[in-house]
Image: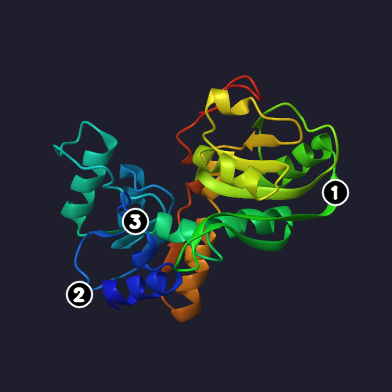
Amino acid sequence: MKVKDITAVLEEFAPLSVQESWDNSGLLIGSQEDDVTGVLVGFDCTPELVDEAVEKGCNMVVTHHPLIYKGVKRINGQDPVGAAIIKAVKAGVAVYAAHTTADKVIGGVSYDMAAKLGLENVHILEQDAECTGLGCVGEFPRPMTAEEALEHVRKAFGLKVIKHSKPVKGLISRVAVMGGSGGSEIAAAMAAGAQLYITGDISYHNFFTPEGFMVMDIGHFESEVGIVDIFLSKIRKIFPNFAVLKSAVLDGSNPVRYYGIAGPQS
């Protein structure tokens, strides 16, 4: 098994050609011709994830967020990115990321969110010329009050907390979703007729919403982490007898902690 065999599966699902111009999806460390002993799939390529890969005999890591993103001016062990790069290079671990490539394709991050919510008649929120795009929009199986929608979203994503704007007074039927930082797509959600928009990393002023429209910020990690299982299923379907593992510490890898809900998080 070669690195190129694994990347081919991922790029059949999420082609590098669709990534945003500012993104850095693809093979970040290693060679396409390197032999692969096993693949560990996680969300962020942290030093801990590289350590876990080495411990489990995996010499390839696949994540959603790119390890090398906006440029690296120096590589040392004093920051998490530098430490992860050093560990991966020393151990011969290839590092691959499918970021906006997996955000934009049908069946990717936003479609996973829609599936968790049970949305129907789902389509891309902002479709581009390649028939891909960020976010998607659909309908609840039945209209819900804002309070019912909040509880439905909380259960669907296993959330401890939801930040949200003033609740909509009527019933909510049309819903837009986008994984990760989706504040830039609020206008698109409203233009698509959504009464509710669910995403992460919404800034303060965006919570001042017009009548009949509501936003929910469920967290960046929480909105996107489902893509890990999608990567796993794609690789395992093609290579069912190969060692493709899910990070055992995925649930605790969210860098954001919430205090005062059920006590401090470790």
Amino acid beneath label 1: Pro
Which label is found at residue 185?
Answer: none
From the viewer's side, name the closer residue of 47 and 152: 152
Position of 149 with respect to 239 (left or right) is right
From the viewer's side, name the closer residue of 105 and 156: 105
At a point 25% along the width and 33% down the height, the residue shown is 79
How many neighbours does mark 3 have within 10 angstroms: few (below 14), some (14-19), or many (20 or more)?
Answer: many
Query: From mark 3 to mark 1, how far is it between C-alphas?
Result: 45 Å
Query: From mark 3 to mark 2, how far is it between C-alphas?
Result: 19 Å
Mark in front: 2 vs 1:
1
Q: Name the residue under label 3.
A: 53
Position of 198 with respect to 183 (left or right) is right
How many neighbours does mark 2 have within 10 angstroms: few (below 14), some (14-19), or many (20 or more)?
Answer: few
Q: Name the residue under label 1.
A: 143
Position of 249 with respect to 44 (left or right) is right
- Earlier along the polypeptide chain: callout 3 or callout 1? 3
Mark in front: 3 vs 1:
1
Verify CB contact (< 8 Å) between mark 3 and mark 2: no
Mark in front: 3 vs 2:
2
Which label is found at residue 33?
Answer: 2
Q: Dividing the image into 4 quarters, which one contains the N terminus? A: bottom left
From the viewer's side, name the closer residue of 129 and 5: 129
Answer yes or no: is residue 108 visible. Answer: yes
Q: Quadrant of residue 161?
A: top right
**x, y percent for residue 65:** 38, 49
* View extreme (left): residue: 74
Of helix, strand and loop, which one carries label 3? helix
